Amino acid sequence: MNLGDLFDPPPPRWGLRGDPHLWQAMRRRFADDALPADQQGLEKAVETAFEEITGVRMSDGTETVRMPEYRIGSGMSDGMVSGEWWRTSARVLLRDRWHVAVNDR
């Protein structure tokens, strides 16, 4: 199992319409990366990738990030990533999946 595997399957709910696109970008970004040895490493990796891809630090408290490349013509939040959803829901989901993965080794 690698870090990218934690992104499969996608979550059942998203913050904004751009979140699934960022989720897939992160999955591709981490496809060949080993699972971090500890939870702090996991959180650092996700925060770093979030900043690399969006140009915004996750910890800045930004509520929405405009990502024009994620626009597909699907409504008001089209192309928008929810910083709040990534700081809360996504972080918890990935942390839970990481715990399961490292305890199944």
Image: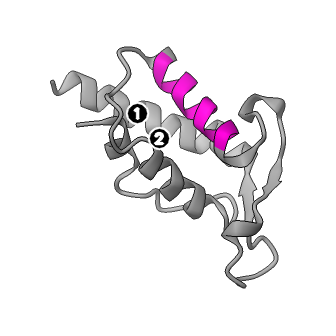
The N terminus, quarter of image: top left
Magenta segment, prevailing SS (helix, strand or loop) = helix
Q: CB atoms at circles 2 and 1 under 8 Å apart?
A: yes
Tell me how the rendering is colored.
Answer: one colour
Q: Is residue 79 left or right of residue 104?
A: right
Residue corresponding to mark 2: 93
What residue is rendered at 32% in x and 45% in y?
5
**26 or 43: nearer the eye?**
26
Q: SS for tag 1?
A: helix
State which quadrant residue 14 falls in.
bottom right
The C terminus, quarter of image: top left
The three-letter code of the residue at mark 2 reads: Leu
Residue corresponding to mark 1: 96
The three-letter code of the residue at mark 1 reads: Asp
39 within the magenta span: no
Q: Percent x, y for residue 7?
A: 40, 48
Q: Is residue 92 left or right of residue 87?
A: left
Segment colored magenta: 41-52
Labelled disc at residue 51: none
Q: CA distance from mark 2 to mark 1?
A: 5 Å
Q: Label 1 crowding class (10 Å Cα cut-off): few <14, some 14-19, many 20+? A: few
What residue is rendered at 55% in x and 43% in y?
90
Q: SS for tag 2?
A: helix
